[in-house]
Amino acid sequence: MHAMQYSVTLPADYDMEIIRHRVRTKGHLLDTFEGLGLKAYGIRERGTDGSPVNQYAPFYLWADQAAMNRFLTGDGFRGVIRDFGRPAVHNWQGLYHRPGPAAGRTPGTFTRWTERLPESADVATAIEDALATHEKLAATEAVHTTALGLDPHHWELVHFTLWTDAAPESAAGQRFQVLHLSTPGLARLGGGRQW
């Protein structure tokens, strides 16, 4: 499994209905994309849930790396580049994925929190601690899906959780509204730890 996200930050007065329309008319195109486990079409709106910006920031869990590469070099991503410029694409090696009790319901939000591991931290211990947190999250009633990834270039963990409704106040990280969810290969992501 590979986790991936890019963010397109938009002007403060940008009409976010343009993004909503884009997702309504094009989001279904990845509903059958071979090798994609999950794509959450996320947005942040300035002044909502503490967001200082308008942003389009989809989050992906890929079942295989070749599919991720095909997407990044294919027509769909060319459309993103044409309309918004070429964004930096962050990706993380998958360490954990598990559906939650609400996996059969439509998610309304996701949270994403990145955690830089200090130079002094023992990486294996930090990962074990993060895995324990995700095991608890995976049993939480409002959780659709939770995942953990590692960027060994920056020694950073990414914590990603899809929620059926608004994320609870206690949930760490940035909050994104989910406009659409594509899950063509959700079963291929596996369940539990991948480390």
Image: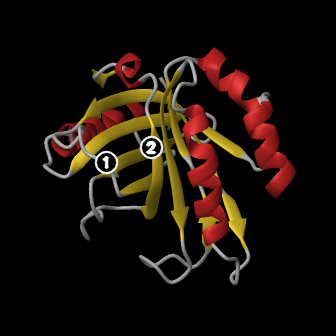
> In terms of sequence position, does the residue under pointer 1 or pointer 2 come before the other?
1
**Which residue is at a point 41% across and 34% down the rendered structure image?**
123
Instruction: Indicate the amino acid at tag 2.
Output: Leu
Quadrant location of the C terminus?
Answer: top left
Q: Secondary structure at mark 1?
A: loop
Where is residue 2 drawn, in percent x and y? 52, 27
* Residue 178 in the image: above or below residue 168: above
> Disc 2 marks which residue?
181
**Which residue is at a point 64% across and 62% down the rendered structure image?**
19
Q: Residues within 10 Å of mark 2 (few under 14, many from 20)?
A: many
Observer able to see residue 74? yes
Q: Is residue 55 left or right of residue 181?
A: right
Q: Secondary structure at mark 2?
A: strand
State how far apart marks 1 and 2 are (Cα).
Answer: 8 Å
Observer able to see residue 195? no
Where is residue 161 drawn, in percent x and y? 35, 48
Where is residue 81 drawn, in percent x and y? 82, 47
* Disc 1 + disc 2, Cβ < 8 Å: yes
Where is residue 169 drawn, in percent x and y? 26, 71
**Which residue is at a point 32% across and 40% down the rendered structure image?**
146
**Which residue is at a point 56% across and 49% down the rendered structure image?**
58
> Disc 1 marks which residue?
106
Instruction: Indicate the amino acid at tag 1.
Output: Thr
Considering depth in this image, is 54 or 117 the residue closer to the camera?
54
Count of numbered circles in the view: 2
Considering depth in this image, is 124 or 115 the residue closer to the camera?
115
